[in-house]
Amino acid sequence: MRRAAGALTQIARLFGVLVTVVAVVGCGATHDQRPGRSEHRGATAADVVGARTAPGSPQTLRAAAVTARGLSVDQLAGQRVIYAYAGLRPPPSLLTAVRRGQAGGVIFFSWNIASVAQIRGVIEQLQRASLASPLHDRLLMMTDQEGGEVRRLPGAPTRSEKQIGESRDGVALARAAGRGAAGELRSVGMNVNLAPVLDVYRHAGNFIDEFQRSYSGNPATVGRLGSAFIAAQQGSGVAATAKHFPGLGAAARSQDTDLRPVTLDVPLTQLRDVDEAPYRPAIAAGVKLVMVSWARYPALDRTYPAGLSSAVIQGELRGRLGFQGVTITDAIGAGALVPFGKPSQIGVMAAHAGADLILCAGTGPSGSSPLQGLSVLHALAAAIGDGGLTRSSAVASAARILALKAHP
């Protein structure tokens, strides 16, 4: 999210995980490229290959699937919503949605944080409300703590990704950054970091390099350092999010998806050999979430941005790379999405494409309101109710999210 810049192994076991998920959750769903259409699919070879990346143990997945199957339509929809708000206190509408079990989590920006004590109190209040809900679960509490200039909390990691990438001790520094970020987030009760950035920048000073948000222009270096960050952070109890799939490293300085539609006409071989390459070691390291970008990649989909494209989410990320964790959109208030309708419509389109979590936030405090998340919740519930979104796909997404909530 560009607006953040400058703001302070065995085969048998794998097969067992897959069998558990398929047996309890039922068939997943894949989606074609037309909004409003979906179809069932059974387990594929890619599912088996990627089972190692499914969140949680077989027991956690089984329990999550059973819970998901018992949710109401509104709760199924709500589990996919990440809410945002303006100001220092969560508004009553957000607390009500949380108490009803209609929330996946909350994202916090700089305008929500006045001090460590203040934000810790807010998170405790929200978690108490969630534990009092019919689901009795904890919310996903997230922020962007990438490092360097892009931090919401005033602590580690102080080095930017680029500084780490240019160091001779890059791997050690990346591990330290991951542990440091986890420590900062855990100190206030957050359990998800929207980091690391795995974009492979092409030119100095371009969109992703301007604020030193990329480790390197070498995909092998990005993959090595990013996976070190992921392993260290998740080993310290905070889920990591690799972003922005399939990559924003080719974006020019003016190509800001927060402001306007962006098309990255990168050849397919380059997309796969450069931009997507760091995701293989990240997935092998067990990254729990992947954020999909709002840029459009004609080599993969000539019509839709990546976050609204089943070719990108289901085809590239889940099918080709085998990721079976939780997928999350970037902020749905981005300018890149204006041609595709209102946030409620965009949320349904993203769910059709295969996004599990919908990040319902704008590009500043004025665009951050629980009302946006509630509009997406109601649109998703309506789509499930009328069959536009299959219940089986909604249950599968909710199960992944509930498993992540149980063990971030």
Image (spheres, rainbow, N blue to C red):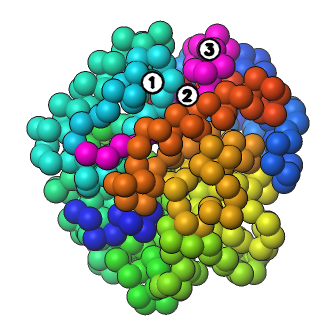
Instruction: Farthest residue to the bottom: give it.
Output: 204
Q: Is residue 80 visible?
A: no
> Residue sitting at 64 percent across and 10 percent down?
70
User: Is the residue marked by circle 3 packed among few (<14), some (14-19), or many (20+) residues within 10 Å?
Assistant: some
Q: Determine if residue 133 is in view.
A: yes
Q: Tell me: 130 left or right of 398.
A: left
Residue 71's label in the rendered image is 3
Task: State the image coordinates of residue 42 (x, y, percent, origin top left).
Answer: 86, 32
Q: Is residue 266 above or below residue 276?
A: below
The amino acid type of the residue labelled 3 equals Leu
Q: Earlier in the sequence, mark 2 or mark 1?
A: 2
Nearer-the-camera pick, 389 or 21: 389
The quadrant of the image that shows the C terminus is: top left
Whether tag 2 and tag 1 are in contact, CB under 8 A, the answer is: yes
Position of the N terminus, as image quadrant, is bottom left
Q: Which residue is mark 1?
A: 97
143 with respect to 19 (left or right)? left
Q: Secondary structure at mark 2?
A: helix
Give the labeled residue for mark 2. Answer: 78
Pinpoint residue 2: horizontal percent, then vertical percent. Answer: 42, 68
Q: Secondary structure at mark 3?
A: loop
Frontmost of labels 2 and 1 is 1
Q: Is residue 221 above or below residue 225?
A: below
Specify whether residue 81 is painted magenta. Answer: yes
Give the amino acid type for the residue marked by disc 2 in the picture.
Answer: Gly
Q: Callout 1, which amino acid?
A: Ala
Quadrant of residue 145 within the rendered picture: bottom left
Residue range of the region highlighted in magenta in the rendering = 63-87
Which x, y percent locates residue 230? 42, 52
Q: Residue at x 37, y 59 (%)?
A: 364
**Which picture quadrant has residue 245?**
bottom right
Work out whether mark 3 precedes mark 2 in sequence or the reverse, and give the earlier one: 3
